[in-house]
Amino acid sequence: MVTKEMEPGIYEATIGVATDPLDIMVKLTIGKNIGNGNASGPTDKATGSAKKKVYALFDITNGAGRGCRSGRGATIYSKACKYDKGADYESESSSYSSIIFTTLGRSDYSFDIFTLPTSLSQFQDQEIRITDSYSVNFNGHFPSPSPSLLSFLFNSNQTQTPDLQLIYVTERNGSSNIYYDALYYPSTSSPLQLRLQRPLLHHHNTLISMKDKPTLTADYLIYVSTHEDPGQPRSSWSAVYSTQLTTGFTRRLTPYQIADFSPAVSPSGVYTAVASYGINGWDGEVEELTTDIYIFLTRDGTQRVKIVEHGGWPCWLDDSTLFFHKRSQDNWISVYKATLPENGPISTDTVTIQRVTPPGLHAFTPATSPGNNNFIAVATRRPNSSYRHIELFDLANNEFRELTRLVSPNTHHFNPFIAPDSVRVGYHKCRGDSKRKDQNTHLLLENLQSPLPDLSLFRVDGSFPSFSPAGDRIAYVDFPGVYVVNRDGSNRRQVYGETAFSTAWNPVHEGIVYTSTGPTFASESTEVDIISINVENNGVKKLTTNGENNAFPSVSPDGKWVVFRSGRTGHKNLYIMDAIEGERAGLQRLTKGPWSDTMCSWSPDGDWILFASDRHNPGLGSFELYMIHPNGTGLKKLVESGSAGRANHPSFSPDGKTVVFTSDYGGISAEPISNAHHYQPYGEIFTIKLDGSDLKRLTHNSYEDGTPAWSPKNLRAVDVEWAKEEECAFEDCHWLNETPKHSDI
């Protein structure tokens, strides 16, 4: 280890030489309190104002930091590439393009992983923040100590066992990855002295995918990844993989055409348990899943057998005992125990099932530690609380013991995990109070790693975004109003204050934005109208007159016409009206039928109008993409969603050759109960050529991605900050608010 003093009391360290170009070599602080509004060591308080001092070394040859594309094929890396107002766009050919989209609530997440002791009665002064407050960190695992693996990971002679070790999922650097952190404290009363950190799946950097639920057993990492397409619409891409860290050898453990979630490895490492639909597949569930529990050999995925009908989020007590959650007959979500037979075949008929947690509250995402027959950890939602908390459940006395409510009662806490020696429980939550106070500035545009070399991809902090014709401004919805902000994050202002959804700029008449004002997800007769907004003076003009669910305007490339959907006949069909005077100047009906045609987009050459429709199966919530000429001829299907599937919010590329849309084509990627609330946690962003070829998945996560839009110019692949108060504010799963009635019990 080589260290040098950066300033009094602060040291920078290099652990050996990075043998892999994606290796983060070290993060450390010596002799300084790094409490960033949260505890960072045994003596740090849950609140504090100490300045954070962290230095990171990055190999800049291929970047563990944020990758910033700088011209065709070139890459520059630093800890965080920021927006440069002097260079808005790439100076590249027209073949390069950019897409922005919305992820429900994600821009307001600020998750870090924390830990509390399991044996003390006073917790307020004992909470430690383990992760480094960079990006979003969640779904942790305490690995067993392994000096040899530690030495290998950091290519050094550092063999001292860390005081804390953590494997976790992080979304830094614009993609999902699994990191390993080793933390050292000089004494139990001292702040953090040294943090060693590196990504564990650096050799998978070219495979854009969601990573989830990691476990380290010996030198093997077991985890979920979504990088393989099963080739069937509405089939989840989630599968369990094993990567040997010393060699990089990776094996798929989940059978092809099957999806697995929430893997857990037995204490011996011999078995892995998963939640899975098996060959039946996902059928559109978005709440508590009716998956089953399967087990198989960790070494190669063989000897796979179903042991539990209906269950999720398994965890092992020993190699013959598991815990899991499911919704009980009384409608409370509860934790159950499955005991495998000592002899003979293992099946759902030979496994003994016992309910563990009582009715009266929801208890889920259980956690165990090897051989600990005394207690488990669970997340709970109690009828008298609006927040998700972590509690211990005494297995002998059948009693709960609260943990996190005593520390931060008005914060959600997710997905507990217990240290191998049972002395600590970990979980993730928002860092700080409701207002985030850390080194992370709020982002208007978060640059994500793109699976396509000629496309830059951004998550925008706002719904229904659209770019101005010049690409210098973005209109978006932040319920209840419509806002406009400069591309560089400056000059954010509200231009319309009522409830609205969808935005579209007039490509010819400067500063005119169209939107739909009124309730969302409403019936055909609900009062919703199309309005135009002059963003220079906030002038508003109502363009539709009957108020019967007129929505989703899109403007013709000559700026003269607006296509929109309307429920004026009792069914939602498409109409075209004058872009300046509205339907008073004339109205053309474009589609007609007892179905819903909606979410339209006019092609840049004016020849086509793209829209979503359930005409193939009216009224059942399944939508596919269709195209039609503005004169009502040439109707054809572009995207087939599969049985009961959804393809929505289409948008043409600037050259008119490609369409971006959101879809459930990739199914669901994780158990929804392990996340904050998402109405449609299957939503991902896809592109497809106008001839129906070359379907590409762009995003991989367990959130709800939607309302994508193209930029008229290619944007540099950098984050764009803006001056907005940072809040960690989101809703827990709505269905956890439901209290079963007595008649349900």
Image: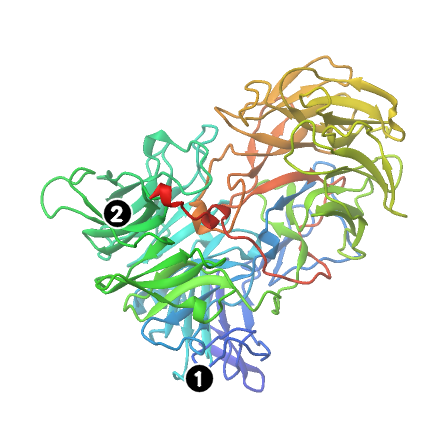
Residue located at (29% from left, 68% from top): 422
Residue placed furthest toward the top: 633
Residue located at (54% from left, 86% from top): 9
What percent of the width, then of the height, locates residue 18? 47, 64
* Residue located beneath label 2 in the image: 299
| Residue type (three-letter) at the residue carrying disc 2 | Arg
Alpha carbon separation for disc pair 1 and 2:
41 Å
Q: Is residue 107 left or right of residue 154?
A: right
| Residue type (three-letter) at the residue carrying disc 1 | Ser
Residue located at (72% from left, 57% from top): 83
Q: Please report whichever mark, 1 or 2, sits nearer to the chain's N-terminal start.
A: 1
Q: Quarter-wise, where is residue 545 in the image?
A: top right
* Residue located beneath label 1 in the image: 190
Residue placed furthest toward the bottom: 8
Q: Please say whether residue 204 is visible from this viewpoint.
A: no
- Do the residues bearing badges 1 and 2 touch, measured as CB atoms within 8 Å? no
In the displayed structure, 474 sits above or below 349; it is below
Q: Quarter-wise, where is residue 710 in the image?
A: top right
Residue placed furthest toward the left: 343
Helix, strand or loop status at disc 1: loop
* Quadrant assignment for the C terminus: top left
**Viewer-closest of 263 and 91:** 263
What percent of the width, then of the height, locates residue 588? 80, 18
